[in-house]
Amino acid sequence: MTGPSHPSSASGHPRLWVIASIVVLAAVAAAGAMIGPAGPDWWRVPLAMLERIPLLGADGLGISSGVTEREWSIVWDIRMPRVVLAGIVGAMLSLGGASYQGVFRNPLVDPYLLGAAAGGGLGATLVITTFGRSGLDWPVDPVPLVAFVFALGTVAVTYAVGASFGGLRTSGTLVLAGVAMVSLMTAIQTFVLQRNSDVVREVYNWILGRLSTATWSDVLLVLPYVSVSAIVLGMHRRHLDVLRVGDDEAIALGVPVARVRLVVVVAATLGTAAVVAVSGLIGFVGLVVPHMVRLMAGSSYRVVIPLAVTIGASFLILADIPGRTLSSPAEVPIGVVTAFIGAPFFIVLLRTRQVSR
Amino acid sequence: MSSFSAVVPSGSWLGLIGPNGAGKSSLLRAAAGVVAHRGQVLVDGAPLDLRHRSRRAALVAYVPQEPTLPDDMTGAEYVMLGRSPHIGYFSMPGRGDRAMVDDVIDRLGLGAFARRRLGALSGGERQRLVIARALATEAPILLLDEPTSALDIGHQQQALELVARLRDDHGLTVVSAMHDLTLAGMYSDRLVLLHEGAMVAEGPVAEVLSADTLAEFYGVRVTVHHEADGTVVVVPRRDRL
Ligand SMILES: Nc1ncnc2c1ncn2[C@@H]1O[C@H](COP(=O)(O)OP(=O)(O)OP(=O)(O)O)[C@@H](O)[C@H]1O
Ligand SMILES: [Mg+2]
């Protein structure tokens, strides 16, 4: 050992990773806004955006894109909400997945573990079978609302059941309670669907996840929950690192383990339930994006948590692009695309990392 | 554990010895506040349980017998965990914490492992990082459960010497469970012999490490040598026919 050593900057350069991933996210989001059927020429889109910034447009610098109001409305009212919603959903799912994996000390866990997806799915199924989907002209769409409430309710029951058996000190019983509740919710859903086979297709569409109907109001609906969730989870990223050495040692290191676990689960579930309510069950992202992040930038949650947000967002925006352009004859569900793009990418990443180690 | 009571003066080193299952680890776990227990652990006359958890953690550093080491954590990240009690709930490690971690890593000669994954280290290298984590806490009380069981004779000495030096310099109080009786005797001021959950002998090293006592509670035949400098050497004996 000679010369100055700076071992504690160990996990590479976390800040560089975060900056790089933000650049990637911006690029992917821009691509998302520029690519799509109909609409203006792709290169006019950035100009049209600049044109609308005060002092840069006609009354200032005089940037002119030549994009008609009609074309602009395709970009702003159809493409943008979809890009933004995909970003929020992707960020939240991978953030939720990383957090669940942290508090349960289990790499195979996804944010649906405790029943957020199964509960949401059952809630949506009940609404659609009771009222039908198309003939509905309520002022507020009840499907996301009921899905949200069912998702939260299911996780709350799971937590209560798990806590009553194992105490909150062990996460194992909570995972088992989650498995039981997910099976129960899925079974009820299947039962309800069997007796209402006329809406199976509608329900199936909802379950597979979709961003195609995204509007700005969907974005505004989920944004508060996702923001709160992301802030709370971000503030606990150091605790997630301490939890990696197990409950006993974390307690000896002064971490209030049971409380941290509860807070993290509540926050992750709140955000997950909100995105499930507007976008259905999009698989793969929550399980695999955190692992992609770990393979790239190391396993410390101080890096994993922020990168899960940026890379999760980029990933889902990217995965949504083929679905929008290759939409004939019927749109490919986003949940299918995520696995289709993500699985091979993940395998390649695993292989290259294995070799370099 | 049934009966145990001992006073450990600050700045001293208490060795816990006893056969497997005697209750050494249970005692240390209780002292570290990890398991529920009856009775009290008093520090400076005040019960440890009543202190705020991060105060308690900053006061008592604990090295478990079988620590959990996440395979994909780096050595430096692991040692940094020892700083947790000093970092505010919503804060992140600062410059001072990093300097402290670098310093401990240097002093234990672990620089080569700081950036490596724990999963790729040998048993002894991991154990030294665990000791480094405990030292990074800068706690005045160290609870060490078999801290050197996986170390070669050189690294045993290096690690224990470092603890001994820190104790001399900073007045640390050390309670350690060790199976190597000679080593336990060499570093401890006093020894406590546990057997089936009870304290059966307590006193200065030379008193506790007597051939008769060891024969009674370990069921072994040993020779005990007393060296000129006061070191007590326990050597297992084999009666050849
Ligand atoms: N969680 C537990 N629940 C019930 N009994 C336990 C538990 N942990 C330990 N014991 C029992 O308490 C006794 C003391 O265990 P302890 O681990 O303290 O022994 P030890 O002196 O550290 O032994 P060793 O030298 O093998 O490490 C043993 O008989 C063990 O089986
Ligand atoms: Mg033990």
Image (cartoon, coloured by chain):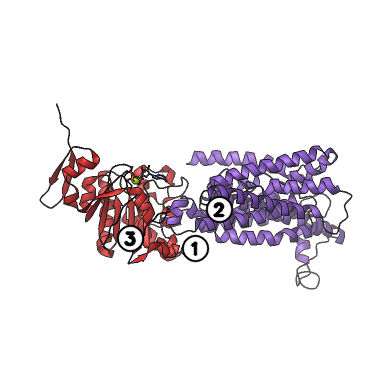
User: What is the display colour for chain B?
Assistant: red
Please report, as a chain letter, where disc 1 is located: B
Between the residue at mark 1 and the residue at mark 2, the CA separation in whole angstroms equals 15 Å
**Residue at 46%, 54% in the rendered image:** A250
User: What's the mark number on residue B54?
Assistant: none
Same chain for labels 1 and 2? Say yes or no. no
Please say if the residues under marks 3 and 2 sit with CB atoms less than 8 Å apart. no
| Residue where numbered disc 1 is placed | B92
Position of the C terminus of chain B, as image quadrant, is top left
**Residue at 60%, 45% in the rendered image:** A177
Please report, as a chain letter, where disc 2 is located: A
Tell me which chain appears purple. A
- Looking at the image, which is closer to me, B151 or A350? B151
SS of the residue under disc 2: helix
Please report, as a chain letter, where disc 3 is located: B
- Looking at the image, which is closer to me, B128 or B200? B200
* Position in image of residue A37 (x %, y %): 82, 49
* Position in image of residue A88 (x %, y %): 69, 56
**Residue at 85%, 39% in the rendered image:** A198
Which amino acid, by three-letter code, is at mark 1?
Met
